[in-house]
């Protein structure tokens, strides 16, 4: 198994996270690096989705991954093995989210001059990560079919802060009572601007659309 | 649709939650009321599991339910309609967990003299609720098959505080790469004392075992 670096993140000392997040975004803009903050509940398929997507992107742009977790390094190793792109693990020390300063501590361990896109896999949690601006250039989330189409009603803040909602595990839709149109409507009620892309990280369906969305976002971001 | 009461929970003012939780437990013991704190990620099937279980319990013991959520009242209504037992909705005002004082605010809205068992459906989150003792007499959690068998490695605290782990959605095991024995082993590593009951809230499989576990816990608790 490849070794991956594990970074122990310290609790943020900045009182004003929003200001700090804006500063980080400004800095990333200057360096031409696009940071995507990817959020979801545990088990929505974030890591599998990333592997599929990165393998479609890595010949076009330079990608790196930061895996945030309470504990463990399974995901960073998986991504490094399956894609070959730089991947580091951030340990949050029990914290349920990342803020901008914690994100910066992770970025300090990546050679940003060699990278166009950094994907931050946030802690698996639909509540707390939505409350903290990480300094990312865009927020995306994964909702998976087994979780149910009513989740936008129950976690409104998460859906309202996301530019993109991926609906994963569409391959198991026949076995679950999940209505895609109803889900789209609930998302629209919370956030009319959010794009919605149904995908199956397992079969690869829809992953191309997510990869294209990322390529476009990165290109726009890198335009001075 | 039945109306349910929605209680807006205020943030706790108690600095010492552990002491407060012990006090609440002591009070519940004195009143012969068993409080179960049920935790899980979003979409694990908590509400469906509760409906199935309560319908097997309600002729044997008196049950009430407190549904904690950031927003919405869907679950409390569902439970009231499907089981007929008293069910109230707690709004946490954006908070990602309940502590003992918040739990007490909910209990203040239930006629405890008419109840043997109160089930608290905690906020859907595998991180924060594990950090706060609610004053419950036992902790249980639901892990669902689509979330993956590796979750005990990634959310160790949650698994370590639970007396019982229900593994739900066993009916869809053929469609997911979920190894029950591996999952049991990971749980054992985190918490050798935790009981594990595989269930399918959809088909009813295993629900009787959970109902029996609850009946036994309540009986033991009510023994002076």
Image (cartoon, coloured by chain):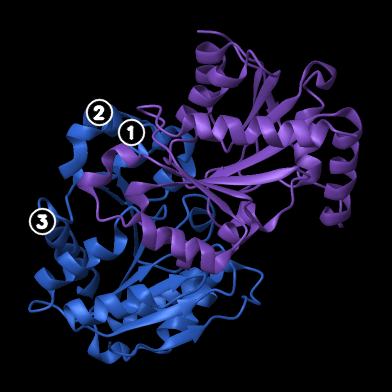
Chain colours: A blue, B purple
Q: Which residue is mark 3?
A: A204
* Residue B74 can be seen in this image: no
In the displayed structure image, the side of residue A72 where residue B118 appears, left or right: right
Tag 1–tag 2 contact (CB < 8 Å): yes
Give the CA separation, mark 2 to mark 3.
21 Å
Q: What residue is shown at x 80% (from left), y 29% (from top)?
A: B33
Q: Earlier in the sequence, mark 1 or mark 2?
A: 1
Task: Tell me where residue B129 appears, x and y as whole percent.
Answer: 63, 51
Residue projecting furthest to the top: B1
User: Given the image, what chain letter belongs to the residue carrying mark 1?
Assistant: A
Q: Are marks 3 and 1 on the same chain?
A: yes
- Along the line of sight, which residue is nearer the eye, B179 or A42? B179
Give the CA separation, mark 1 to mark 2.
6 Å
User: Given the image, what chain letter belongs to the residue carrying mark 2?
Assistant: A
**Callout 3: 10 Å neighbours few (<14), some, many (20+)?**
some
Q: Quadrant of residue B56?
A: top right
Mark linked to residue B151? none
Mark linked to residue A149? 1
- Along the line of sight, which residue is nearer the eye, A158 or B224? B224
Q: Secondary structure at mark 1?
A: loop
| Count of numbered tags | 3
In the displayed structure image, the side of residue B167 where residue A96 appears, left or right: right
Task: Tell me where residue B55 appears, x and y as whole percent.
Answer: 54, 17
Q: Quadrant of residue A45?
A: bottom left
Give the CA separation, mark 3 to mark 1.
21 Å
Q: Which residue is mark 2?
A: A179
């Amino acid at each position: 198994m490849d070794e991956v670096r594990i970074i122990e993140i310290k609790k943020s000392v900045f009182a004003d996270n929003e200001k700090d997040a804006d500063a980080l975004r400004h800095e990333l803009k200057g360096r031409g690096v696009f940071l995507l903050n990817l959020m979801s509940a545990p088990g929505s398929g974030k890591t599998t989705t990333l592997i599929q997507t990165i393998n479609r992107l890595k010949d076009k742009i330079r990608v790196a991954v930061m895996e945030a977790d309470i504990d463990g390094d399974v995901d960073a190793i998986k991504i490094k093995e399956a894609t070959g792109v730089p991947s580091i693990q951030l340990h949050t020390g029990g914290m349920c989210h990342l803020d901008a300063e914690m994100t910066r501590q992770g970025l300090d361990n990546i050679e940003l001059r060699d990278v166009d896109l950094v994907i931050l896999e946030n802690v698996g949690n639909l509540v707390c990560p939505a409350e903290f601006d990480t300094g990312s250039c865009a927020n995306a989330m994964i909702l998976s079919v087994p979780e149910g189409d009513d989740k936008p009603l129950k976690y409104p803040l998460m859906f309202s802060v996301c530019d993109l909602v991926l609906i994963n595990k569409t391959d198991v839709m026949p076995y679950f009572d999940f209505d895609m149109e109803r889900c789209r409507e609930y998302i629209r009620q919370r956030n009319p601007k959010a794009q919605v892309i149904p995908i199956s990280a397992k079969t690869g369906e829809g992953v191309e659309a997510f990869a294209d969305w990322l390529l476009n976002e990165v290109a726009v971001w890198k335009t001075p």
